[in-house]
Every structure is written in C-alpha cells, then in structure tokens.
Image (cartoon, helix red, strand yellow):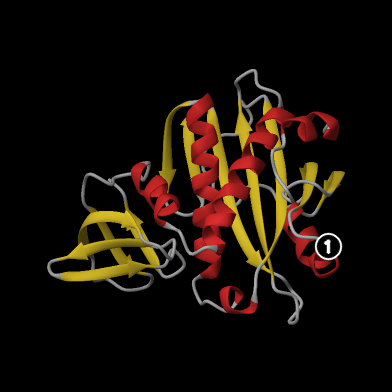
Amino acid sequence: MYEYELIEKELNTKFMGRVFLQFESIESTGAKCRNISQDCPKGMLVLSEDDIEGNTYLDKDLKNFKNKVLMSLILKLDRNNFNKDFIESLINCLGAASIIEVANENFEEVEYIWEKVILGNEFAAEIDSYKSLKNNDKSIILSFRLYYNKDISREILIGKILNTIELNFNNLIKDNLENIAKTCTTYLKSKDTNIKVNKRNRKTVKELENIRINKEGKLVGKHKSEEIIIDWKDYEIDWS
C-alpha cells in the first residue's frame, strides 16, 4: 500500500492531497471519486493498488513496467467554470501539463499523445476527467494511471505531481491558461509536422498544419485558411 506519510512530506500544497483514501482494489479511482465527490473536500486524493477497469487508451504493453500508480483527485469549481462546455478538456490539459512537467524532470523523451496519453522513455500515463454524477455537485474528477521503471518512489512522484497540479489549478481559476496550453503544445506529438484528420464515420480527410493546444485544452490546426478545433471523441487522427 502507499505510505501517505511520505507523500505528505513532499507536499507544498494547501489542499491537493491533504485528505486521502486508498484501496487495495476498486472499480477505478475515478469512478470512486464520482460517487463520493459531493461530500468530500477539494483536492481529496484517492489511490488504489489495482482496479477492475484497466487501461483504456494505452496500446503499449504495460507488463514490463515495475511501478504503477492509480490516482484521482476531486477538484471543486464555481458554477461559471463548471458549466463551460470545454471544462473537461481543459481539466485534461491541466492534468497533462502537470504530468509532463514532472515526467520531464525524471524521464527522457516525454511526448504528449493528445489529450489522454503521455509517453516517455520508461514512462507511460493515461489522463482522464469526469464531471460528478450528482447534478448539484460542481466537482471535476481528474484521474491518472502512471507506469514507470525508474527507481523513484511512488510517494515522491505523487507528491511532485500534486504540487504541480495545485499551481496549475490556481492558474486555471485566475484564467491564466497560457503556460498550461504552452506546455502541452511544446510536447505535443507531430507539432512540427502535418496531421490528417477525419470525422468519425466520414470519408473526407483534411490535412492540418500549425498544430497546437488552445486555451480550452483542445487540439487545433489549420486546413488551408480554416482553423479547425478537434474534439477527440468526434475525430480520427493519423499522426504519421
């Protein structure tokens, strides 16, 4: 099990990770948070050794990784921020930027595979975000699945991530999103080349250039003179 005392020693936060739950195995840390978020304080951390859900976005073989971290955070937003139609993609971007910053300090060749996945030398991560299941609960759940081989303790890594998330979350609240988007764009796969996209179940393929992440946490590119905002749920992408 995780040693929370070691995580706590790393924390420079006011609320991220200051309240803590952990489990041997659950459906997923995200699902657990969605069910309890209404009655939990902001920044509550939920950890698990294993889960039933399993990885959703990673195609990589994960059996060779020595270390695994399954974690979710409960973030509290005001009504205006919570009701933004892009809030989940923005929270995903915040989570990705935070993981990238920490991973870049500890692993080589870190690369952001748009919205849900980060890969590095001896490192892999999945990111996801969900609104609460309760209509009157303005919580956003930020979830991570981390896999790595380097000899750094899970607790130290978690502490560093929580510190970075709180800094980025404070910037989000102040509507200061430039650094978050810049970090994700800097490490974005194929940012210096063109990519091909098409809406799911359609044959028309568009080639996009000037690829970047915008302040809504969404992938943006240009096709001729048209700027196209791409929602990962609606598009298929050829990164090659």
Hey, which quadrant is residue 234 in on the image?
bottom left
One can see residue 1 in this view = no
Q: Residue at x 29, y 45 (%)?
A: 190
- Residue furthest to the bottom: 135
Question: Which quarter of the rendering shows the C terminus?
Answer: top left
Relative horizontal placement of residue 87, taking residue 223 as reference (left or right): right
Tag 1: amino acid = Cys
Question: Percent from the top left, x then y, of residue 65?
Answer: 62, 27
Q: Which residue is mark 1?
A: 40
Q: Quadrant of residue 147?
A: top right
Residue 65 as seen in the image, left or right of residue 123: right
Residue 142 in the image: x percent, y percent?
64, 56
Q: Position of residue 235 (x, y in %)?
A: 38, 66
- Left or right, residue 10 beside residue 81: right
Of residue 188 and residue 97, the one placed in the foreground of this image is 97
Q: Secondary structure at mark 1?
A: loop
Which residue lies most toward the top here?
151
* Picture quarter with the N terminus: top right
Bin the neighbour count of mark 1 within 10 Å (Cα to Cα): few under 14, some 14-19, many 20 and up: some
The quadrant holding residue 32 is bottom right
Please tell me how many numbered marks the rendered image carries. 1
Q: Residue at x 61, y 74 (%)?
A: 82
**Residue drawn at point x = 78 percent, y = 44 percent:** 47
Residue 213, x across and y down, in percent: 36, 56
Does the image show residue 205? yes
Height in image: 169 above or below 17? below
**Vertical position of residue 175 compared to residue 126: above or below:** below
